[in-house]
Amino acid sequence: MWPQPLNSTVQQMGTASSMLTQYDIEEVQEHCNNLFSQQEIVSLYERFCQLDRNAKGFISADEFLSVPEFAMNPLSQRLLKMLDGLNFKDFVAFLSAFSAKTSIHQKIELIFKVYDSDHNGKVSFKDMLEVLKDLSGSFMSDEQREEVLSQVLRDAGYSKDSYLTLDDFIKVLGQSDLKMDVEVPVD
Amino acid sequence: MNGAGKLKSSSSELDLDRPNIEDYLPSGSSVQPERSGKLRLCDLLDISPSLSEAAGAIVDDSFTRCFKSNPPEPWNWNIYLFPLWCCGVIIRYFILFPIRVLGLTLGWIIFLSSFIPVHLLLKGNDDLRKKIERCLVEMMCSFFVASWTGVVKYHGPRPSMRPKQVFVANHTSMIDFIILEQMTAFAVIMQKHPGWVGLLQSTILESVGCIWFNRTEAKDREIVARKLREHVQGADNNPLLIFPEGTCVNNHYTVMFKKGAFELGCTVCPVAIKYNKIFVDAFWNSRKQSFTTHLLQLMTSWAVVCDVWYLEPQNLKPGETPIEFAERVRGIISHRAGLKKVPWDGYLKYSRPSPKHREGKQQNFTESVLRRFEEK
């Protein structure tokens, strides 16, 4: 847990950079496998404090949803299960999957985690169907979704009853040109 | 204090008439490359565009930026400047501030001692009473502006009083109203405030014809819409001022203009207000501070510097919808005041975005998937 007083002082001072020590930054950098530069960490910390309105030291689901661009995202509810109550270190760790320096392997791992809602290490037909439901909403019927998904799975050599593991995901998604980079604005 | 979203009678129709958000969002992450070819498993499992968009919004988003107060640049960082800065603090807090409080109190005494008798005694002579009250309100606003040493430059012709016109301005703080009011007694549409501001609203501002409402009350909207229409038809009413953004924005951006002011069938006179942040940030962050604190902050600063432009009156062009008209006027104001336009509805500060926006994305996704699925 990120120490509480730090956040409240930062709010008073107005600038976050003055409050993160070299040690803090290095600790966070280590936590995210050095995927972010010092400047990026400072930037992210400012953003974290901005989102964490009451300076609790973590960001609640409601605070994430106060960003309309996020709330509009079809996957926002699903992502909130991973995001709700993140402290600064975990916040950075989550975002590190979107760094340009992150390997494709790690990016696929995050995608896998989004699918694997019950954290059992495998993704069932139902899991995939649910994500598809988030993405298509009311524009596809349940039958259509099942039809599309089972057909596509069959083409790829899986069946409706097979469970996909992380390795399967890497095999399947590794061949597509996955693009999942988000730049941290540094001023 | 507020804009004109209240013309809508029900919230269900809200979604139909907004500028298209996708038109404004930065391209890149939000625009998916159109893929073709037969649908494969990897296409279906690949949720990276949505994830990138979500992460992008978490890292930085244009909505939050509109309401961010800007901390003052410190300049007291060396041994020569620090004593100077200290002198400044002493002058500002212990000399300027008491003088200003005194001036403001004096203003109030003069104002109340003439307003109350005029209001009570001249009941029979409405025209004269209105005229005097209008002058008194303008005077009181000048006292307010003087209390933060407002250095206001007005550009363009002063507003005239005629029927069938509304003034619209961008909104940074309640002081916008005071600054505009000291030149011309506008009747303004505003949010009902609690505390002493609310008291002023229901007593004094009533006399210049101000209309207020509660943002969250749908019923209020209808009443306001009716009052609005009545007001603009009256020949000798004070000119109407609307802040169509409906909320205070930090004077770097403009958020969506509510269409209410633009569908009255009146001439719309845009007013652009730009604050100079050299001494103090005039943005009222109503989440963080009360209006009293905001005023104190202004009263302890050196000065509030701002420019006001009265721009050329605009009319609805043939074939233009009120929303397009609102967007055009917003463009004119943003251009003049050097503000960036963002597509967001300022009311999102108080509520969540409607599911309509999400549905647009879902529809695009579905269309692409089904099209490719059918391809053989």
Image (cartoon, coloured by chain):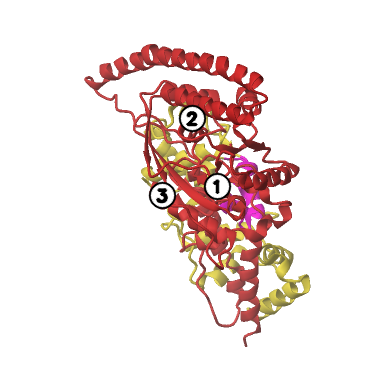
What amino acid is labelled 1 in the image? Val
Classify 10 Å Cα crowding around label 3: few (below 14), some (14-19), many (20 and above): few
Label number found at residue B166: 1
Label number found at residue A185: 3
Q: Which chain is red?
A: B
Between residue B250 and residue B190, name the one nearer to us: B190
Instruction: Point out the image quarter for the N terminus of chain A.
Output: top right
Q: CA distance from mark 1 to mark 3?
A: 40 Å
Q: Which chain is yellow?
A: A
| Region of the chain picked out in magenta, as a range | A60-86
What amino acid is labelled 2 in the image? Gln
Residue B201 in magenta?
no
The number of numbered badges drawn on the structure is 3
Secondary structure mostly taken by the magenta-highlighted segment of the chain: helix
Vertical comparison of B17 with A15: above or below = below
Vertical comparison of B28 with B34: above or below = above
Q: Is there any visible trace of residue B60 in the rendered image?
A: no
